[in-house]
Image (cartoon, grey):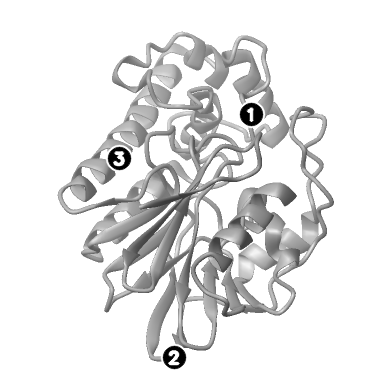
Amino acid sequence: MSTNDLHDNLGPGLLEEVAPGVFSYVQPDGTWFINNTGFIVGESGVVSIDTTSTELRNRAYIDAIASVTPNPVTLLVNTHHHADHTHGNYLFPDATIISHTSCRDVMMATGIPDYRSAFPSVEWGNLQFRAPDITFEGSTKLHLDGIGIELFDLGFVAHTEGDILAWLPDQGVLFTGDLIFHGGTPFALFGSVQGTIEALNVIEAKGADVIVPGHGPAFSGRDIKEVLASQQIYLEFVQETAAQGVRSGRSPVEQALATDLGEFQNLTDSERLAGNLHVAYRENPEAGYDWVGFETAIADMIILNGGQLPHCVA
């Protein structure tokens, strides 16, 4: 593993060759807007899996690619529409960008979200909007100088409505996007708690040797079963906590405030429990819950966080 020294205020991005010609780029500490990317190097070009959040972080990622190969990035995969995975699209002008149809639809509807009021200390840089060029549903396959990269969706809502995974069967490497937060609190506010659980089953069935998650360290070998199980246990905890709240007549934020996180207290971004509970209430047939919208759910996360905005050091 090698470490790239990035700009002084960014901290190190960890560049690792996880299989021959396949690299993960993991950004500690994996919290809000600090995501992972990765790339595959061929004889004539490079395929990038996602971009990252701020202009500086994206330029640091581009420098990391250049430290490995002079070849251009010719294809760029967006695993889903969230800004920390798509903000850097414009910095790859020669790349064809591919995503799920729903991913592009949401991006076209929202453009570049203005996070400056929510995270005023973050230097976002001169961000410019660029949407995917090619979309698909189901599955497709990329070919990079003899390297096969299988892209597939889940067929159901999980982290978002348009999640896709990138699978390299010959190398045994799976890029999951934000279907996994290794060491962090899973986040289903823009998708489905139950769908995310089902996505973990799909991931396990691939039998990967190495998994590169959307946030947190890459993992392999015997750690795979443990990490997937820990993610599922948390999501089932959210469902049971929601059921308790419904039985007690509490709102999602009231239930969140009354909940002891127990074994999950050391996960980063624990305020996500409030947002996750809104989704779990919506999915609970006993709740009789009317969806209140993302703004209210996010406001409840701030309440759970002691009235403070979520911690973001991007």
Q: Earlier in the sequence, mark 2 or mark 3?
A: 2
Label 1 Cα neighbours within 10 Å, binned few <14 / some 14-19 / many ≥20:
many
**Residue 54 seen in this snapshot:** no
Q: Which residue is mark 1?
A: 297
Mark 3 closeness class: few <14, some 14–19, many ≥20 residues within 10 Å? many
Q: Quadrant of residue 152?
A: bottom left
Give percent across and percent down for residue 143.
45, 88
169 or 246: nearer the viewer:
169
> Would you name the residue on which mark 3 appears?
232
Residue at the limit of the structure toward the bottom, as seen here: 146
Could you tell me which residue is drawn at 63 percent across and 14 percent down? Answer: 303
Q: Which mark is nearer the camera, 3 or 1?
A: 3
Q: Disc 2 and disc 3: Cα gap in Å?
A: 37 Å
Camera-near label (2 vs 3) is 2
* Residue reaching furthest to the left: 222
Side (left or right) of 59 relative to 261: right
Res 145 label? 2
Residue 231 or residue 74, whichever sits in front: 74
The 10 Å Cα crowd at callout 2, few under 14, some 14 to 19, many 20 or more, is few
Left of 9 or right of it: where is 41?
left
From the top left corner, tell me how far across and down residue 25 is, in percent: 47, 55
Q: Position of residue 262 (x, y in %)?
A: 31, 15
Spatial separation of the CA atoms under disc 1 and disc 2: 46 Å
Name above or below for residue 197 compared with residue 149: above
Q: Please state which amino acid type lies under the numbered disc 1.
A: Ala
